[in-house]
Amino acid sequence: MRRALPWLLLILLITQQMAFAANNIENQLEDLDIREINEFINEFNREYGSYFYLGDLKDLLNSPKKDQNIDFKSLFEGIMRYIFHEITANYSLLVKLIALSLISSVLKNLYYGFEKDNIGKMAYSAVLLVLVLLAIQSFTIAIETGQEAINKMVSFVQAIMPTVFTLLAAVGGITSASVFNPIIFIGITAASTWFKDIILPVIFLISVLSLVNNITDSFHVSQLAHLLKQLCVFLIGLFLSVFLGIMVVQGATAATVDGITIRTAKFASKNFMPIVGGIFSDALDAVVGYSIILKNTIGLIGLLTLFLITIFPVIKILSIIFIYRLSAAIIQPVGEDAMVRCLNDIGNSLTLVFISVASVSMMFFIAITIVLAAGNFSIMLR
Protein backbone atom coordinates (compact mmCIF):
# COMPACT_ATOMS: atom_id res chain seq x y z
CA MET A 1 0.00 0.00 0.00
CA ARG A 2 2.84 2.37 0.81
CA ARG A 3 4.44 1.70 -2.58
CA ALA A 4 1.18 2.43 -4.39
CA LEU A 5 0.55 5.68 -2.49
CA PRO A 6 3.13 7.82 -4.41
CA TRP A 7 1.72 6.59 -7.72
CA LEU A 8 -1.82 7.40 -6.62
CA LEU A 9 -0.77 10.87 -5.53
CA LEU A 10 1.04 11.42 -8.83
CA ILE A 11 -2.00 10.30 -10.82
CA LEU A 12 -4.26 12.55 -8.74
CA LEU A 13 -1.92 15.51 -9.22
CA ILE A 14 -1.72 15.06 -12.99
CA THR A 15 -5.50 14.61 -13.26
CA GLN A 16 -6.15 17.76 -11.24
CA GLN A 17 -3.58 19.71 -13.24
CA MET A 18 -5.18 18.70 -16.54
CA ALA A 19 -8.70 19.31 -15.27
CA PHE A 20 -7.64 22.74 -14.08
CA ALA A 21 -6.10 23.47 -17.50
CA ALA A 22 -9.18 22.22 -19.35
CA ASN A 23 -11.49 24.31 -17.18
CA ASN A 24 -9.37 27.36 -17.87
CA ILE A 25 -9.10 26.92 -21.64
CA GLU A 26 -11.76 29.58 -21.99
CA ASN A 27 -9.38 31.94 -20.22
CA GLN A 28 -6.53 31.32 -22.70
CA LEU A 29 -7.66 34.38 -24.57
CA GLU A 30 -6.88 36.49 -21.51
CA ASP A 31 -3.26 35.37 -21.70
CA LEU A 32 -2.91 36.24 -25.40
CA ASP A 33 -1.89 39.69 -26.56
CA ILE A 34 -4.76 40.60 -28.88
CA ARG A 35 -4.67 44.37 -28.41
CA GLU A 36 -3.27 45.07 -31.88
CA ILE A 37 -5.85 42.78 -33.50
CA ASN A 38 -8.60 44.61 -31.63
CA GLU A 39 -7.18 47.95 -32.75
CA PHE A 40 -7.49 46.93 -36.40
CA ILE A 41 -11.04 45.68 -35.88
CA ASN A 42 -11.99 48.90 -34.07
CA GLU A 43 -10.39 50.98 -36.81
CA PHE A 44 -12.41 49.08 -39.41
CA ASN A 45 -15.59 49.64 -37.39
CA ARG A 46 -14.88 53.37 -37.20
CA GLU A 47 -14.19 53.68 -40.92
CA TYR A 48 -16.72 51.27 -42.42
CA GLY A 49 -19.04 50.53 -39.49
CA SER A 50 -21.94 52.28 -41.22
CA TYR A 51 -21.79 49.60 -43.92
CA PHE A 52 -20.88 46.56 -41.80
CA TYR A 53 -20.07 46.49 -38.08
CA LEU A 54 -17.67 43.64 -37.29
CA GLY A 55 -17.80 43.88 -33.50
CA ASP A 56 -15.20 43.20 -30.82
CA LEU A 57 -12.77 40.27 -31.09
CA LYS A 58 -13.87 38.70 -27.81
CA ASP A 59 -17.51 38.92 -28.87
CA LEU A 60 -16.63 37.23 -32.15
CA LEU A 61 -14.81 34.43 -30.31
CA ASN A 62 -17.77 33.88 -27.99
CA SER A 63 -20.40 34.14 -30.72
CA PRO A 64 -20.55 30.34 -31.39
CA LYS A 65 -21.35 29.70 -27.71
CA LYS A 66 -24.16 32.26 -27.86
CA ASP A 67 -25.45 30.93 -31.21
CA GLN A 68 -24.64 34.31 -32.76
CA ASN A 69 -23.09 33.81 -36.16
CA ILE A 70 -21.73 36.52 -38.42
CA ASP A 71 -24.54 38.02 -40.46
CA PHE A 72 -23.32 37.50 -44.01
CA LYS A 73 -26.56 38.92 -45.38
CA SER A 74 -25.79 42.23 -43.69
CA LEU A 75 -22.23 42.01 -45.01
CA PHE A 76 -23.49 41.56 -48.57
CA GLU A 77 -25.96 44.41 -48.20
CA GLY A 78 -23.23 46.65 -46.77
CA ILE A 79 -20.90 45.87 -49.67
CA MET A 80 -23.66 46.65 -52.18
CA ARG A 81 -24.40 49.97 -50.43
CA TYR A 82 -20.70 50.86 -50.53
CA ILE A 83 -20.53 50.04 -54.25
CA PHE A 84 -23.49 52.36 -54.87
CA HIS A 85 -21.85 55.03 -52.68
CA GLU A 86 -18.57 54.93 -54.61
CA ILE A 87 -20.26 55.02 -58.01
CA THR A 88 -22.37 58.02 -57.03
CA ALA A 89 -19.31 59.68 -55.47
CA ASN A 90 -17.49 59.37 -58.81
CA TYR A 91 -20.50 60.55 -60.80
CA SER A 92 -18.96 64.02 -61.13
CA LEU A 93 -15.86 62.42 -62.69
CA LEU A 94 -18.07 60.76 -65.30
CA VAL A 95 -19.76 64.08 -66.12
CA LYS A 96 -16.41 65.85 -66.44
CA LEU A 97 -14.99 63.18 -68.74
CA ILE A 98 -18.03 63.22 -71.01
CA ALA A 99 -18.07 67.04 -71.10
CA LEU A 100 -14.37 67.17 -71.98
CA SER A 101 -14.89 64.60 -74.71
CA LEU A 102 -17.73 66.56 -76.26
CA ILE A 103 -15.74 69.80 -76.10
CA SER A 104 -12.68 68.16 -77.64
CA SER A 105 -14.81 66.72 -80.43
CA VAL A 106 -16.28 70.15 -81.23
CA LEU A 107 -12.85 71.80 -81.15
CA LYS A 108 -11.40 69.11 -83.38
CA ASN A 109 -14.15 69.67 -85.96
CA LEU A 110 -13.55 73.42 -85.80
CA TYR A 111 -9.83 72.81 -86.19
CA TYR A 112 -10.33 70.87 -89.40
CA GLY A 113 -13.19 73.13 -90.57
CA PHE A 114 -11.14 76.32 -90.42
CA GLU A 115 -8.11 75.09 -92.32
CA LYS A 116 -6.32 73.79 -89.24
CA ASP A 117 -5.76 77.18 -87.59
CA ASN A 118 -3.41 77.42 -84.62
CA ILE A 119 -6.08 78.72 -82.24
CA GLY A 120 -8.22 75.62 -82.75
CA LYS A 121 -5.18 73.41 -82.28
CA MET A 122 -4.24 75.18 -79.05
CA ALA A 123 -7.79 74.92 -77.71
CA TYR A 124 -7.94 71.22 -78.55
CA SER A 125 -4.57 70.63 -76.88
CA ALA A 126 -5.73 72.53 -73.80
CA VAL A 127 -8.75 70.22 -73.47
CA LEU A 128 -6.49 67.16 -73.74
CA LEU A 129 -4.21 68.67 -71.10
CA VAL A 130 -7.19 69.08 -68.74
CA LEU A 131 -8.06 65.42 -69.38
CA VAL A 132 -4.49 64.40 -68.54
CA LEU A 133 -4.56 66.38 -65.29
CA LEU A 134 -7.92 64.88 -64.37
CA ALA A 135 -6.65 61.39 -65.16
CA ILE A 136 -3.49 61.86 -63.09
CA GLN A 137 -5.57 63.17 -60.17
CA SER A 138 -7.93 60.18 -60.12
CA PHE A 139 -5.07 57.76 -60.79
CA THR A 140 -3.16 59.21 -57.83
CA ILE A 141 -6.21 58.59 -55.63
CA ALA A 142 -6.29 54.96 -56.80
CA ILE A 143 -2.54 54.53 -56.16
CA GLU A 144 -2.84 56.02 -52.66
CA THR A 145 -5.84 53.79 -51.95
CA GLY A 146 -3.83 50.75 -53.05
CA GLN A 147 -0.81 51.72 -50.96
CA GLU A 148 -2.97 52.33 -47.90
CA ALA A 149 -4.70 48.96 -48.37
CA ILE A 150 -1.34 47.17 -48.65
CA ASN A 151 -0.07 48.97 -45.53
CA LYS A 152 -3.14 47.89 -43.56
CA MET A 153 -2.88 44.30 -44.77
CA VAL A 154 0.82 44.09 -43.88
CA SER A 155 0.26 45.63 -40.44
CA PHE A 156 -2.71 43.36 -39.73
CA VAL A 157 -0.82 40.19 -40.67
CA GLN A 158 2.10 41.32 -38.51
CA ALA A 159 -0.35 41.78 -35.63
CA ILE A 160 -2.25 38.50 -35.90
CA MET A 161 0.51 36.04 -36.81
CA PRO A 162 2.31 36.07 -33.40
CA THR A 163 -0.97 34.99 -31.78
CA VAL A 164 -1.51 32.29 -34.40
CA PHE A 165 2.08 31.04 -34.00
CA THR A 166 1.68 30.91 -30.20
CA LEU A 167 -1.45 28.78 -30.51
CA LEU A 168 0.19 26.68 -33.23
CA ALA A 169 3.05 25.86 -30.87
CA ALA A 170 0.54 25.16 -28.09
CA VAL A 171 -1.09 22.39 -30.14
CA GLY A 172 2.28 20.78 -30.83
CA GLY A 173 3.24 22.54 -34.05
CA ILE A 174 6.57 23.76 -32.70
CA THR A 175 8.47 22.96 -35.90
CA SER A 176 5.75 24.54 -38.04
CA ALA A 177 5.78 27.71 -35.94
CA SER A 178 9.57 27.97 -36.10
CA VAL A 179 9.57 27.42 -39.88
CA PHE A 180 6.65 29.69 -40.76
CA ASN A 181 7.67 32.55 -38.47
CA PRO A 182 10.65 33.82 -40.54
CA ILE A 183 8.98 32.97 -43.86
CA ILE A 184 5.83 34.96 -43.04
CA PHE A 185 7.56 38.04 -41.65
CA ILE A 186 10.22 38.14 -44.37
CA GLY A 187 7.48 37.60 -46.94
CA ILE A 188 5.21 40.40 -45.76
CA THR A 189 8.14 42.83 -45.50
CA ALA A 190 9.25 41.89 -49.01
CA ALA A 191 5.67 42.19 -50.29
CA SER A 192 5.35 45.68 -48.87
CA THR A 193 8.57 46.79 -50.58
CA TRP A 194 7.93 44.84 -53.78
CA PHE A 195 4.42 46.15 -54.46
CA LYS A 196 4.54 49.63 -52.90
CA ASP A 197 8.01 50.70 -54.03
CA ILE A 198 8.36 48.78 -57.32
CA ILE A 199 5.06 47.59 -58.81
CA LEU A 200 2.84 50.62 -58.12
CA PRO A 201 5.42 53.22 -59.30
CA VAL A 202 5.92 51.19 -62.50
CA ILE A 203 2.15 51.17 -63.04
CA PHE A 204 2.07 54.95 -62.61
CA LEU A 205 4.85 55.26 -65.20
CA ILE A 206 2.85 53.04 -67.57
CA SER A 207 -0.17 55.33 -67.27
CA VAL A 208 1.93 58.45 -67.95
CA LEU A 209 3.54 56.87 -71.02
CA SER A 210 0.13 55.80 -72.32
CA LEU A 211 -1.26 59.32 -71.95
CA VAL A 212 1.78 60.86 -73.66
CA ASN A 213 1.48 58.37 -76.50
CA ASN A 214 -2.19 59.24 -77.09
CA ILE A 215 -2.05 63.05 -76.91
CA THR A 216 0.90 63.57 -79.26
CA ASP A 217 1.49 62.50 -82.83
CA SER A 218 5.25 62.96 -82.83
CA PHE A 219 6.33 60.98 -79.77
CA HIS A 220 5.33 57.30 -79.65
CA VAL A 221 6.05 55.18 -76.58
CA SER A 222 3.30 52.57 -76.86
CA GLN A 223 5.75 49.67 -77.11
CA LEU A 224 7.65 50.84 -74.03
CA ALA A 225 4.39 51.07 -72.09
CA HIS A 226 3.42 47.58 -73.30
CA LEU A 227 6.82 46.19 -72.27
CA LEU A 228 6.54 47.69 -68.78
CA LYS A 229 3.03 46.28 -68.45
CA GLN A 230 4.23 42.77 -69.29
CA LEU A 231 7.15 43.20 -66.89
CA CYS A 232 4.78 44.31 -64.14
CA VAL A 233 2.51 41.28 -64.59
CA PHE A 234 5.57 38.99 -64.64
CA LEU A 235 6.94 40.46 -61.39
CA ILE A 236 3.58 40.02 -59.65
CA GLY A 237 3.32 36.39 -60.75
CA LEU A 238 6.95 35.70 -59.85
CA PHE A 239 6.60 37.00 -56.30
CA LEU A 240 3.38 35.08 -55.67
CA SER A 241 4.81 31.84 -57.08
CA VAL A 242 8.02 32.00 -55.03
CA PHE A 243 6.36 32.96 -51.75
CA LEU A 244 3.46 30.50 -51.92
CA GLY A 245 5.71 27.73 -53.25
CA ILE A 246 8.02 28.06 -50.25
CA MET A 247 5.03 28.18 -47.89
CA VAL A 248 3.49 24.99 -49.27
CA VAL A 249 6.70 22.94 -49.38
CA GLN A 250 8.03 24.03 -45.98
CA GLY A 251 4.58 23.81 -44.40
CA ALA A 252 3.97 20.22 -45.48
CA THR A 253 7.40 19.14 -44.26
CA ALA A 254 7.15 20.92 -40.90
CA ALA A 255 3.63 19.62 -40.23
CA THR A 256 4.77 16.05 -40.92
CA VAL A 257 7.71 16.41 -38.53
CA ASP A 258 5.42 17.80 -35.81
CA GLY A 259 2.91 15.00 -36.24
CA ILE A 260 5.53 12.25 -36.12
CA THR A 261 7.28 13.83 -33.12
CA ILE A 262 4.10 14.09 -31.07
CA ARG A 263 3.01 10.59 -32.06
CA THR A 264 6.38 9.18 -30.98
CA ALA A 265 6.21 11.03 -27.66
CA LYS A 266 2.70 9.72 -26.98
CA PHE A 267 3.74 6.17 -27.85
CA ALA A 268 6.74 6.37 -25.53
CA SER A 269 4.75 7.82 -22.64
CA LYS A 270 2.06 5.14 -22.89
CA ASN A 271 4.55 2.28 -23.08
CA PHE A 272 7.18 3.38 -20.58
CA MET A 273 4.61 4.79 -18.14
CA PRO A 274 1.55 2.61 -18.77
CA ILE A 275 -0.81 4.21 -16.26
CA VAL A 276 0.44 7.73 -15.79
CA GLY A 277 1.47 8.12 -19.42
CA GLY A 278 -1.97 7.13 -20.69
CA ILE A 279 -3.76 9.54 -18.37
CA PHE A 280 -1.35 12.31 -19.24
CA SER A 281 -1.74 11.67 -22.98
CA ASP A 282 -5.55 11.64 -22.88
CA ALA A 283 -5.76 14.77 -20.75
CA LEU A 284 -3.27 16.54 -22.99
CA ASP A 285 -5.37 15.66 -26.04
CA ALA A 286 -8.36 17.38 -24.45
CA VAL A 287 -6.36 20.54 -23.74
CA VAL A 288 -4.86 20.55 -27.23
CA GLY A 289 -8.33 20.10 -28.70
CA TYR A 290 -9.55 23.32 -27.09
CA SER A 291 -6.41 25.10 -28.25
CA ILE A 292 -7.05 23.95 -31.82
CA ILE A 293 -10.56 25.38 -31.67
CA LEU A 294 -9.21 28.70 -30.37
CA LYS A 295 -6.47 28.76 -33.03
CA ASN A 296 -8.86 28.03 -35.88
CA THR A 297 -11.42 30.53 -34.60
CA ILE A 298 -8.87 33.35 -34.36
CA GLY A 299 -7.52 32.34 -37.77
CA LEU A 300 -10.97 32.45 -39.38
CA ILE A 301 -11.70 35.82 -37.79
CA GLY A 302 -8.34 36.99 -39.12
CA LEU A 303 -9.25 35.82 -42.63
CA LEU A 304 -12.59 37.62 -42.43
CA THR A 305 -10.92 40.82 -41.19
CA LEU A 306 -8.31 40.59 -43.94
CA PHE A 307 -11.10 40.24 -46.50
CA LEU A 308 -12.91 43.28 -45.11
CA ILE A 309 -9.71 45.35 -45.02
CA THR A 310 -9.23 44.53 -48.70
CA ILE A 311 -12.71 44.58 -50.19
CA PHE A 312 -13.61 48.22 -49.53
CA PRO A 313 -10.43 49.76 -51.06
CA VAL A 314 -10.77 47.32 -53.96
CA ILE A 315 -14.35 48.49 -54.53
CA LYS A 316 -13.12 52.10 -54.56
CA ILE A 317 -10.53 51.26 -57.24
CA LEU A 318 -13.02 49.21 -59.27
CA SER A 319 -15.54 52.05 -59.19
CA ILE A 320 -12.98 54.41 -60.74
CA ILE A 321 -12.18 51.78 -63.38
CA PHE A 322 -15.91 51.45 -64.12
CA ILE A 323 -16.25 55.22 -64.57
CA TYR A 324 -13.41 55.33 -67.11
CA ARG A 325 -14.72 52.29 -68.99
CA LEU A 326 -18.24 53.73 -69.06
CA SER A 327 -16.95 57.11 -70.23
CA ALA A 328 -15.03 55.50 -73.08
CA ALA A 329 -18.12 53.54 -74.14
CA ILE A 330 -20.34 56.64 -74.06
CA ILE A 331 -18.04 58.98 -75.98
CA GLN A 332 -16.93 56.47 -78.63
CA PRO A 333 -19.93 57.25 -80.92
CA VAL A 334 -18.83 60.89 -80.91
CA GLY A 335 -15.77 59.83 -82.88
CA GLU A 336 -12.98 61.20 -80.65
CA ASP A 337 -10.50 58.33 -80.93
CA ALA A 338 -7.71 59.97 -78.93
CA MET A 339 -9.98 60.50 -75.93
CA VAL A 340 -11.29 56.94 -76.10
CA ARG A 341 -7.76 55.54 -76.21
CA CYS A 342 -6.73 57.69 -73.26
CA LEU A 343 -9.66 56.55 -71.15
CA ASN A 344 -9.13 52.89 -72.06
CA ASP A 345 -5.42 53.05 -71.23
CA ILE A 346 -6.16 54.70 -67.89
CA GLY A 347 -8.66 51.93 -67.19
CA ASN A 348 -6.03 49.32 -68.05
CA SER A 349 -3.48 50.92 -65.72
CA LEU A 350 -6.03 51.10 -62.91
CA THR A 351 -6.76 47.41 -63.49
CA LEU A 352 -3.10 46.70 -62.75
CA VAL A 353 -3.47 48.57 -59.45
CA PHE A 354 -6.47 46.40 -58.64
CA ILE A 355 -4.53 43.23 -59.53
CA SER A 356 -1.64 44.31 -57.28
CA VAL A 357 -3.86 44.90 -54.24
CA ALA A 358 -5.84 41.71 -54.88
CA SER A 359 -2.60 39.73 -55.27
CA VAL A 360 -1.24 40.90 -51.91
CA SER A 361 -4.55 40.06 -50.26
CA MET A 362 -4.68 36.62 -51.88
CA MET A 363 -1.08 35.93 -50.88
CA PHE A 364 -1.74 36.74 -47.21
CA PHE A 365 -5.07 34.91 -47.28
CA ILE A 366 -3.46 31.72 -48.58
CA ALA A 367 -0.49 32.09 -46.19
CA ILE A 368 -2.76 32.26 -43.12
CA THR A 369 -4.79 29.32 -44.44
CA ILE A 370 -1.62 27.24 -44.89
CA VAL A 371 -0.50 28.00 -41.33
CA LEU A 372 -3.90 26.99 -39.94
CA ALA A 373 -3.96 23.85 -42.07
CA ALA A 374 -0.44 22.90 -40.97
CA GLY A 375 -1.54 22.83 -37.33
CA ASN A 376 -4.58 20.71 -38.17
CA PHE A 377 -2.50 18.38 -40.36
CA SER A 378 0.02 17.75 -37.59
CA ILE A 379 -2.87 16.79 -35.29
CA MET A 380 -4.20 14.36 -37.90
CA LEU A 381 -0.83 12.59 -37.98
CA ARG A 382 -0.94 12.05 -34.22
Image (tube, rainbow, N blue to C red):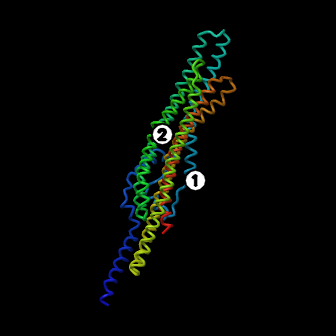
Residue 56: x and y in percent read: 44, 55
Position above or below: 316 against 64 = above
Q: Quadrant of residue 25?
A: bottom left
Q: Amino acid at mark 1?
A: Lys
Residue 217: x and y in percent read: 60, 18
Q: Amino acid at mark 2?
A: Phe
Q: Residue at x 51, y 35 (%)?
A: 142
Q: Nearer the viewer, mark 2 or mark 1?
A: 2
Q: Say which residue label 2 marks.
A: 195
Q: Residue at x 63, y 22 (%)?
A: 102
Q: Residues within 10 Å of mark 1 (few under 14, many from 20)?
A: few
Q: Is residue 20 left or right of residue 359?
A: left
Element assignment for label 2: helix
Labelled disc at residue 73: 1
Position above or below: 133 against 184 = above
Q: Residue at x 39, y 51 (%)?
A: 36
Outermost residue on the right side: it is 333
Labelled disc at residue 350: none
Q: Residue at x 59, y 28 (%)?
A: 223
Outermost residue on the bottom side: it is 1
Element assignment for label 1: helix
C-alpha separation, residue under disc 2 versus residue under disc 1: 33 Å
Position above or below: 76 against 95 = below
Position above or below: 352 against 307 = above
Q: Is residue 166 left or right of residue 72?
A: left
Residue 237: x and y in percent read: 54, 43
For the N terminus, give its image quadrant: bottom left
Residue 138: x and y in percent read: 52, 31
Q: Residues within 10 Å of mark 2 (few under 14, many from 20)?
A: many
